[in-house]
Each structure stands twice: as C-alpha cells, then as structure tokens.
Image: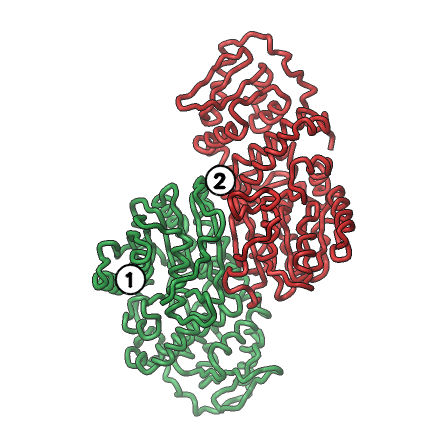
Chain colours: A green, B red
Amino acid sequence: MSRGGAFGVPYKIMNAGEEAVSRVHGIDRWLLRGFLHAMGDPLIHASLWDGKEVVTPAGASQVGMTIHDRTTLWRVLTNPLLNFGDDYSAGRIEIQGGVVAFMEAMYKAMDKKQPLFKKTSRGRNRWDTNSITGSRENIHHHYDIGNDFYRLWLDRELLYTCAYFSHPAASLEEAQIAKMELVCRKLRLRPGQSVVEAGCGWGALARHMAVKYGVTVRSFNISHEQIAYAREKAQAEGIAGRIDYVEDDYRTIKGRYDAFVSVGMLEHVGVAHYGELGRVINNCLTEQGIGLIHSIGQNRAIPMCPWLLKRIFPGSYPPTLREMMELFEPLGLSVLDVENLRLHYAKTLEQWLHRFEKNREKVVAMFDDCFVRAWRLYLSGAIANFNLGNLQLFQVVFARAANNRIPWTRSHLIEAPAQA
Amino acid sequence: MSRGGAFGVPYKIMNAGEEAVSRVHGIDRWLLRGFLHAMGDPLIHASLWDGKEVVTPAGASQVGMTIHDRTTLWRVLTNPLLNFGDDYSAGRIEIQGGVVAFMEAMYKAMDKKQPLFKKTSRGRNRWDTNSITGSRENIHHHYDIGNDFYRLWLDRELLYTCAYFSHPAASLEEAQIAKMELVCRKLRLRPGQSVVEAGCGWGALARHMAVKYGVTVRSFNISHEQIAYAREKAQAEGIAGRIDYVEDDYRTIKGRYDAFVSVGMLEHVGVAHYGELGRVINNCLTEQGIGLIHSIGQNRAIPMCPWLLKRIFPGSYPPTLREMMELFEPLGLSVLDVENLRLHYAKTLEQWLHRFEKNREKVVAMFDDCFVRAWRLYLSGAIANFNLGNLQLFQVVFARAANNRIPWTRSHLIEAPAQA
C-alpha cells in the first residue's frame, strides 16, 4: 500500500494556499451553493477564499466551513465523500464552530434530503479486501501505526472499542473496565473455563478475563504491534501462562472452548466472510458454550464513507442486525440477548477526541498536521454518527439451540460493576 | 371455513378401529420401519394393531406409539406432517410414555437425520392468508372458540403468551404479571403517556398498563370474543375510560403514541406483511416513542408444520430474528434490546398443559375427545420445540434512530417484579 506523506493523503501534490490569491468569481459562489444544495442544504454557513460568506441559511448556527482555493472547490464538488476528508486533512478546508457540530449538520442534511446517501444498494463494499492476506494489510494500515500513538489518547489498558458508562460520571478508565465486566458477565465465565477471542486488540479483555475470572484465554489478532504489546504485558503481569496470544487470522482458530468472544473485530470481517466466521464459531463452541460479538452496526445497509474506507479503516463495514444474523442463522445458533450501546460509543469517542486534542502537539511530532486533522475528522464524524443514530453498537450473546443451561433472567448482569 | 366435527379433523370419515381385526402382514411391519427411517430413526418403540413391537431401537426409552390400523399406517407414510396429527387426534394412533417426550424424540430424529425438514427454502408459508379478511378468518378459527374454554387452563387474567418466571417457584399467575411488568419496564411507561397495542388478546396487558402505570391505551384485536370480554372486564374494573378496545386490524391503527406494544401478534402477521406493520409502527410512534414486539421465533426460516397450520394456527409463522428485522430496517428504526425467553415459554406451556389435562373432562364436554387430543398434541409439541430450541421467544425493543432519550443501561428493568 503506497502512502503519500505520513498518512496517505495526497496533499503534497496539491500545494495548499497556492490559489488563495486568485479572485472569487460569481461562478465560484454559484458552484459552492450547488455543492451545498447537493449535500441537502446543511444548516451551515460557508465561504470561499475571499473570506466572504456565500451561504448563510436561516437557522444556521456558528457552524461553517471555508474552502481555501478553487481546486478544492472543484474537488469537493466532483467527489465530496472522498475529497472533503482529504482536503480538510490537507488544510484546504477549514471548519468553524467545532468539527463534531459541523459533521452533525452535514449528516442531518444528507440524511433528510438525499436518499442517495442512504439507500445505496446492499451496503456491502464493492470490493472485498478481507481475504486472509487482504485483512493483514487492512489491519496493518490502522493498528500498526505505533502503540505510543494510541497510548496518548486511549485508556490506560488500551481498549479501542466502545466503553460502558454504567453511571454518568464514570471515567473512561472505569467505563472500559465496566465494559469488560459486562462482557464477562454476559459470558457467565467461571474459573477453569477456556475462552477463545477473535481480535484481541492490545489484549486487555484477555487479561481481565484471566485475572478476574480465572479462565484460560487464546486470543487471535493479525496486528503485529498489538500482539507484541499484549505478550509483553501478560509476561510483565505474570499471567503469560494463562493467555496464549496468537498472531493469526480468526479463520485459523482450532479447538473447542467454553466461550467465544469478539469485541470490535466484526467491523473488519466483511459480510462476505460472515459464513466463514460463523463456521469458525460453530466449530469452536462447546455444547454448553456461550458466545458474544460486540460490533459497530447500523440500521440500514449503507456502504462506508469512501474517505473513511480509504484513509482510516480499509475493508471495514458496520453491519445491520439483519446482516449479523448471517453469522448465526445458517448454523441454527440461538441469539439470547442483544444490547445496543450506541450512546456509550458517542461518549467513549468524545473522551478519546478530548485526549487526542490535548496531545495534538505530540501527534504532530509523531506524524504531521495532516494526520492530526484526518484523525480529528474521523473521530468527530464518528461522534456525530453515533449521536444521530447513523451508527449503532450491538452486543449479541448467542449459544447453541439445544443448550438449556442458558440464563433464565438477566440477574447475572446486574451486580455492581468492578471499579478501576 | 368448513369444519368436520367440532374441530375440523376428518375423523368421522375414517372409522377408528375398523381395521383393527385385520392381520398384521410382513409388509405392514416393513412399511412402519420405512416410515420411522424416513423420520430419522427416532429413539421410540413402535407397534401395529396386533400389539407386537415392530421397532425397538437401542437406547429407546419407554416412549413409543401404536398405529391402530392399516389405513392410518398408509396415511402417516404418505403425508406424515399432516396426517400424524389428525390420526393421533382421531385416536387411530396412541402414544406411550408421554406426548412431550414422544414429540421430543421425534423432533430430535427429524432434526438430526432429515435436513429435508430443516432446510426448506424461505420459511414463508406458500399461501399468504393474512390479508385483512383472511386474518379475520384465521384468528376466528383459534381465538373465538369460547372464552370459557380458555378460562379452564390459562391464568386468571387470560394471558395466552409466554410468561416470565423471574424466580423458579413462581406460579403461572405470578409469572404472567411479571411478564407484563417486564414489558412495561422495557417500554419505560410513565403516567399520562399513550400506548397503542396491536393484538391485545383478552386485554390483560392494557388493563395492567392503565392501572399500574397510569397510561391510556388503545388496543386492537380482530377476535370478536376477546374484545367483548376485554371491554366487559374494563367496564367492571372501572377503567373503561382509560382503555379503548378496538375490534379492528392492526393495519387500521391511526394517531401517534408514546409507546407501541405487540405481544404475541407477530406470529399471525406473516412475513409478507412485515412491511405494512413496519409502516404502521413508523407512523404511530412519537419522536421519543419506544416500541416492543414479543413474538415466537425460530433460528432458521422453516415453514410451520402443516398439521399445526391447518388445524391449530392457520396463517401463522414464527419468524427468525433476521426476518423480524424486515420490520425495522426499511424504516431505519433502531433495535435497542432483544431478549430470548425460550425456556420461559416451555415452562408456561407445561403449566397450561397441566391445567388443560386437569380439566380434560370439561373440554371433552365442550367439544369432543378429538379436540382434546389435538390440543394436547399442539401444546406438547410446542413444549418439545421450545425445550429443543426449535422455537424461540424474542422480545425486541426499538425506537427511532435519532431518539437519544433511550435508556443508558438496563437498570430500569431490574427492580423486583410485582407479585400477584
């Protein structure tokens, strides 16, 4: 995968500011209005490189944008869903009034007036890049860019998935522990059990399960940096004997386990591969085994934003609940419980963004300003999407159909969560 | 809809016992073995009209059946899924060792060895009979056969849907109240709110909501007898002003409500009509409204047993969770919570069957022995199917995508349920 600059945005090709001196013509203003109309007339103000506001719809708040040159105007007009992100990253577009609020205004407009953005066919990305080798490249692109970077803005155990704020004042650290507790309770883990984990990030859930629940864990991940970190950490904590971190694809999982867990991997699997993942689950779960999948989802099958797919999460796709059922239905597995933690993800992302911005200078030093802007846009857009209900967070608990040792009630979930 | 006898089984055409004197030939035994082999070699013993056991597989328990004449043997051979039920009802087949245990043995065998029974195409019944007029006939067939009959074996409030046994020793009465409590908590009802109910049975949930939660309810049902009972009961309890029982189809629901609830109706809607029901929901729910659908379901899209469809529940079908999503996904509604109460339905049905058998003589007097046997088979088969995981019970909570007043946690569900 070739990368222009530190992050892949071709901003070196376009020299930002180059055209800033050229005069704004009537046609430029007309094109800007046309662009905004095509986006559903968002309630934002907008201006061009002369600084004068071209568009100020009634009811528009302080939220707005400035396009700095004519090339950028043409670029966002011709391919807004890809180029807006790149040109914001390159500094050729500025956003006023906060990126989250701006993205919310944009998404609201696109949602309301442009069924085009909402009803694209089947949701599956056109090109499936999630073969075993393709997945490695896709995961490498996002997760292997440096543990030091993620340490700047994730919680101290490096959980890069939706936290669970069991009370409103919970810190990110507490909420991530509460999430792990919730997952363990839903799996009803008991000492001596074996767990297999598909996609383990930096290994925090495996450590939590091994230490707090006395289980043995085999955790799979194809991110080299994450696995290296997880192994070191388990070694340092003296629990390496109870956790086997395996640098390999979920499709290579063998053996039988009392629990199957996957937190934040399904987004990278691709609907075309749900049959494979389903068969892995079906082969590895004991007769009385319980499984849990935690994944970003959506209410309608809409493809990922092309910019996000190209720059941030190649190969990713948040399934609808209907699509998730393609994991279970062909094998006759029973869905026992689904919980939607959408607003928890908005809150998690807000905390990440806050920490990210606090460490902005350090991130610039690690990468560059373009990277910072791209990640700000990604995190802010995700907050907006979770707030607006364009994205969901599903925790799905499942078991074999004939397993009658499933819980009768949810009373096993309600004990006070562990504190940090 | 023409009915032979009190219940529709054509047992008057076939004179039970007529052929009981004819000799059992080798070919009869060969045919019985062939029938059982075709059913997946269930672990049951089987005999013909000479009383001698023809089949006793290794590992068979005391569970077995006797076929009383040659016509019946041919009938179950040629169309087992329809004729077994009719001929058991007519007394031409006897079951030993308990009907539930017998049905479990049969279903287990069919499940294991006969993918034929499991993988039939799309699950939807071939003939859709759930138009507005068709639904009336279908519902009339089952629910209008006499409130006195249902009073014999349902709980005192006449709830004919899965109860919720929040503790193992709960009575059916307690468990039905706990179910209504669970539904109300999931809807987070508050005094003064308005609720619309699609399919209200004898009206118990509407009364519970009005009395315990101070809401006003508009409840739809096309069963004439149920609506008449519900109106009388509300009148007698002095709450008729807070509940409007409407004898009409869910498709005629108008207005906007704070909550939409449907307990045990979706099974009668038919997947072909989920789009209509979804639009009704979407039109009637306020922006902050919460909805709940409680329905029998299954893990795979398998059509109903033809006998059950013909004799007990015309037009019915238990959807998979994937199929249920066809209610929500086209409209972009958010699924907030799914709970599977499968084992609660097995327990509910056990209590119904127990009460039914205790009142056997009264039911015979109301209908006839054929009716009793048919309903025993239906209730027993349902217990077996819930025990084996062939049927599920899904409670699905949903809301509009942009509704951010959804609950953060499940803490609103966990208060001790009300007692009877």
* Residue holding disc 1: A223
Disc nearest the viewer among 2 and 1: 2
At label 2, which amino acid type do we have? Gly
For residue B403, side relative to residue A401 (left or right): right
- The quarter of the displayed image where residue B314 is located: top right
User: Callout 2: residue from which chain?
Assistant: B
| In the depicted structure, whether residue A333 falls above or below residue A153 | above
- Density class for disc 2 (Cα within 10 Å; few <14, some 14-19, many ≥20) is many
Q: Amino acid at mark 1?
A: Ser
Res A83 visible: no
Disc number for residue B389: 2
- Compared across the picture, whether B190 is left or right of A367 comes to right
Is circle 2 on the same chain as circle 1? no
Q: Left or right: B137 with respect to A129? A: right
Rendered position, A381 above or below A337: below
Q: Is residue A11 above or below residue B85?
A: below
Which percent across, then down, holds residue B203?
70, 48
Helix, strand, or loop for circle 1? loop
Q: Badge 1 sits on which subunit? A: A
**Percent x, y for residue A280?**
35, 47
Residue B353 visible in this rendered orientation of the protein:
yes
On screen, residue A229 versus residue A348, left or right, reads: left
Give the distance between the C-alpha atoms of the residues marked 2 and 1, in whole angstroms. Answer: 38 Å
The quadrant of the image that shows the N terminus of chain A is: bottom left
Point out residue A397 in the picture as x, y percentages from the top left corner: 44, 52
**Image quarter of residue B138:** top right
Q: In this rendered view, identify the residue nearer to me: A190 or B111.
A: A190
Q: Is residue A28 above or below residue B17?
A: below
Q: In the image, which disc is placed on residue A387?
A: none
